[in-house]
Image (tube, rainbow, N blue to C red):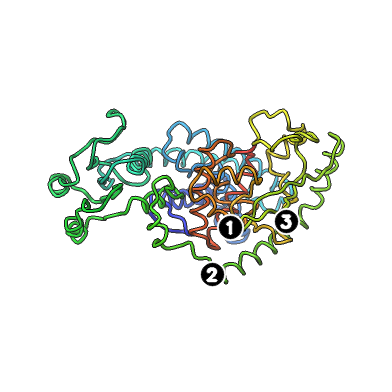
């Protein structure tokens, strides 16, 4: 795993991303020679050919990325990759066509874009087949062993078995018998006491410790000897955080939270968060004011009631504040009771509200909350008091979300969809705690980059 922006990415995924970026550029260079033949050198020398190729290449690469072709659930999926690749390159064709129509000087020659994008599609499909073969080869993966049993150990096994891009092959586990089905779960290799014997028999390169009770059971001497001999010894909670981008809150030990790095927000970080939020919110407000005016007009024409919806939310230190949004429900939809989470095809949503929610335009008035200092641009999403208090009562560590100001977008929002059930909110907390633990400028920029993708695709809304 490689750490970038305070988040870990599998080496194989990063290698795939970098090499496919180079493949896109080479396919476009080849298309210039196909279209111009011996005149290609003139295009590169006198017509800024490399800059024009870089522009088209960047558009194609972003469209491929925004089609989720590097997402952990897609990167190893043989069925999904071709369809998403065609979708991404189709969008790239439309963008390039619009670019060439608006700025004809950006063209290198007639037919270059069609030939180039066709080359890109064929090259990436062929390259992905090679990647699938490489990614699914057990010979090219490190052998891993899990020590322990329980929810954390089972979750780690599922991550390793379903994500070959991690470069690990799970040999089995040591500990008490798991409840997982033998057909799908890893095989039991013995008890914890059998560690030395099992490692001597199997070529293990990594041992992941996920034991519930380590008092007097952890074979410290054996693990230390293995570590000095080159075997990687990894703590289960650390491995889970690295590979999933969230904390294993169901199995977390408070001592791990206390002694692990992170959860320290410096004054410099607070100054950055405030300045970054002010500048970004100010720029966004100026850019979006004409669109917001059209949205307000559409709401006013569509249904009766106030254009702006005001609602109390829980902010930093558990203190309430008023959040501003464009109204997407019929006026008075929640009168007489506590506001309920939005469901699929919710009858409370207006016709205009459906479109606003799909592209998150109903959230744009929250820019005023950011300017007023109620929120950061990036942080845990705030929720209504009754929901927050109920979740705090049912989910341990939930109040830790209140240690930082909430945000208009956050790590949980870009990693998962809408939260409606207790299980959803439990997982949301796992992502929020990861953000609070690893808060940084790089992570904020990554969240904003992912937010743009989600807004453009209209995914995850209700």
Q: Which mark is residue 216?
A: none
Q: Quick one: label 3, few (<14), some, or many (20+) residues within 10 Å?
A: many
Badge 1 or badge 2: first in the primary sequence: 1
Whether residue 133 is visible, yes or no, is no
- Secondary structure of the residue carrying numbered label 1: helix
Q: CA distance from mark 2 to mark 3?
A: 23 Å
Q: Relative to 172, is 420 on the left or the right?
A: right
Residue nearer the viewer, 389 or 305: 389
> Which residue is rendered at x = 63% and y = 54% of the image?
407
> Taking 285 as reference, is 420 left or right?
left
In the rendered structure, which disc, 3 or 1, sits on the residue that comes first in sequence? 1
Q: Quadrant of the N terminus?
A: bottom left
Q: Is residue 269 above or below residue 355?
A: below
Residue placed at 67% from the left, 28% from the top?
345
What residue did someone put label 3 on? 369
- Residue 37 falls left or right of residue 319: left
Q: What numbered label is drawn on residue 42? A: 1
Image position, residue 60 (x, y; %): 57, 46
Residue 412 location (% of width, % of height): 55, 47
């Amino acid at each position: 795993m490689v750490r970038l922006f305070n988040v870990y990415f599998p080496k194989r995924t990063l290698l795939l991303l970098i090499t496919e970026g180079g493949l896109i550029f080479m396919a476009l260079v080849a298309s210039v020679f196909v279209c111009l033949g011996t005149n290609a050198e003139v295009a590169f020398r006198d017509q800024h050919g490399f800059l024009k190729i870089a522009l088209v290449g960047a558009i194609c690469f972003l469209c491929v990325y925004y089609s989720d072709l590097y997402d952990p659930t897609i990167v190893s999926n043989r069925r999904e990759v071709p369809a998403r690749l065609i979708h991404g390159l189709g969008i790239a064709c439309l963008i390039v066509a619009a670019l060439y129509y608006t700025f004809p000087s950006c063209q290198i020659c007639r037919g270059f874009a069609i030939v180039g994008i066709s080359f890109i599609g064929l090259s990436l499909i062929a390259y992905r087949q090679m990647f699938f073969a490489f990614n699914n080869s057990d010979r090219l993966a490190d052998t891993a062993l899990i020590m322990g049993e329980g929810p954390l150990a089972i979750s780690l096994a599922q991550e390793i078995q379903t994500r070959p891009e991690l470069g690990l092959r799970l040999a089995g586990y040591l500990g008490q018998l798991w409840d997982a089905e033998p057909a799908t779960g890893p095989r039991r290799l013995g008890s914890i006491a059998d560690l030395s014997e099992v490692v001597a028999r199997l070529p293990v390169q990594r041992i992941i410790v996920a034991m519930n009770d380590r008092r007097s059971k952890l074979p410290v001497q054996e693990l230390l000897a293995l570590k000095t001999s080159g075997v990687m010894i990894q703590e289960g909670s650390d491995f889970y955080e690295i590979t999933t981008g969230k904390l294993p809150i169901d199995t977390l030990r408070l001592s791990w939270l206390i002694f692990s790095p992170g959860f320290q927000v410096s004054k410099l970080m607070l100054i950055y968060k405030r300045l970054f939020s002010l500048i970004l919110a100010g720029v966004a407000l100026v850019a979006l004011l004409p669109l917001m005016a059209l949205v307000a007009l559409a709401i006013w024409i569509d249904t009766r009631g106030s254009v702006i919806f005001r609602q109390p939310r829980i902010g930093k230190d558990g203190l309430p504040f008023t959040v501003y949004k464009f109204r997407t429900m019929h006026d008075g939809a929640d009168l007489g009771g506590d506001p309920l989470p939005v469901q699929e095809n919710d009858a409370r949503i207006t016709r205009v509200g459906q479109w606003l929610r799909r592209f998150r335009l109903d959230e744009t008035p929250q820019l005023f909350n950011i300017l007023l200092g109620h929120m950061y641009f990036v942080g845990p999403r705030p929720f209504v008091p009754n929901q927050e208090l109920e979740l705090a009562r049912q989910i341990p560590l939930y109040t830790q979300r209140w240690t930082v100001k909430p945000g208009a977008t956050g790590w949980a929002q870009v990693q998962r969809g809408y939260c409606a059930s207790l299980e959803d909110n439990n997982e949301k907390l796992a992502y929020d705690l990861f953000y609070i633990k690893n808060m940084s400028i790089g992570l904020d920029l990554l969240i904003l980059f992912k937010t743009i993708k989600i807004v453009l695709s209209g995914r995850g809304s209700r």
